[in-house]
Image (cartoon, grey):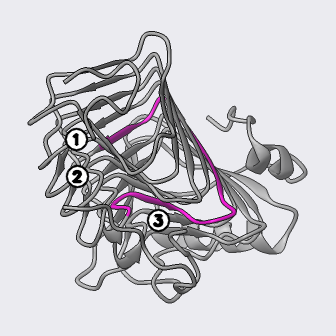
Amino acid sequence: MSFIKLPSGVAVAVLAGAALVAGPAAAQAQAAASVQIPCRASALVSAISNANSGSGGIIVLPQNCNYDITAAAAPGDGLPVITGHVVLSGAHNTAIRRRAATSFRLFEVAAGGSLSLTSITVDGGSSAGLGGAILNAGTLVLSRTIFTHNTAGNGGALANSAGGTMRVSDSDFERNTTTGVGGGAIINSADLIVTGSVLSDNTAPINGGAVNTQPSGTTRLINTTVSDNTSGSLGGGLSNLGTLILTGSTVTQNRGSAGGGIATGNTNVTLGGGTRVRNNIPDNCNPLNTIPGCVG
């Protein structure tokens, strides 16, 4: 059993209420008026294209609406690649879903682009490459967002590429899957902060049932729960080759071949105040006694 690092230089993403106005995407988008769109996938595609070509935009999605994406708008992506500054603001029961026989992820954020999502469920994205729901090489801000049933070669829901910035708050990741190396919910090769969120029931065949941090990545989990995730090898909950910092977080009931809670290939893991790593199978941390504060 060993950690697997993905090679560099792979394709574009090397594994190396409209009241939401926090984050670069929203700040940039304030230059443009917000627009409320009807519950049609074609309207969402058009609104994103318009925001890309202009000075950005705040796109308000109605409640109780499923935007079912049935065809790719760009190669490998269900919606237009985010090259501008785009905010998508949903409400109760707003969802963006892949509903097609063909596979494609739902969002891609290009370097220099920024995307904010709030109060939206992102469901069923699928990619043989990186990020079943979202592949990010720019700036991604997520709040009160649910990611479920997304699948990718790596990073079942999210992939944060080298150079990307990702901020996640008050969000849920559940039943996402990777088919390649790891990161059932998230694979991170850059700057990732997750606050007040839950990652549960995600699966990876090798490293990191919930989160896989690559050598160039720094992952910070704050007041976040990682539970009931599964890895076929190391790191049932979390797998680290970069830097991993937990504060006030809980890692429990995860399962792997070793490091049921956390597995690390270096000494760059910090368990901050209030963090609990317990009741993972077959052990909490691997290698044993290498992560200060983690017992068994």
Q: Secondary structure at mark 3?
A: loop
Q: Secondary structure at mark 1?
A: loop
Quarter placement of the C terminus: top left
Q: Find residue 173 and report its image quarter.
A: top left
Q: Are marks 2 and 1 in contact (CB under 8 Å)?
A: yes
Viewer-side label of 3, 1: 1
Q: Earlier in the sequence, mark 2 or mark 3?
A: 3
Front in this rendered view, residue 155 or 103: 155
Q: Find residue 178 and report its image quarter.
A: bottom left
Q: Is residue 33 above or below residue 164?
A: above
Give, as a three-letter code, the residue at label 2. Answer: Leu
Q: Earlier in the sequence, mark 3 or mark 1?
A: 3
Tag of residue 234: 2
Looking at the image, which residue is at 57% across and 84% down? Answer: 9
Looking at the image, which residue is at 47% across and 24% down? Answer: 196
Say left or right for 181 vs 220: left
Looking at the image, which residue is at 27% across and 78% down? Answer: 100
Give, as a three-letter code, the residue at label 1. Answer: Gly
Q: How far from the left and from the top, in percent, is residue 207? A: 28, 57
Tag of residue 40: 3
Tag of residue 285: none
Front in this rendered view, residue 258 or 229: 258
Say left or right for 185 vs 278: right
Q: CA distance from mark 3 to mark 1?
A: 45 Å
**Residue behind mark 1:** 259
Q: How far from the left and from the top, in percent, is residue 197? A: 42, 30
Q: Earlier in the sequence, mark 2 or mark 1?
A: 2
Q: CA distance from mark 2 to mark 3?
A: 42 Å
Specify few, some or many for label 3: CA neighbours under 10 Å numbering under 14, 14-19, or 20 or more.
some
Span shown in magenta = 155-173
Asked if the magenta segment contains residue 171, the reply would be yes
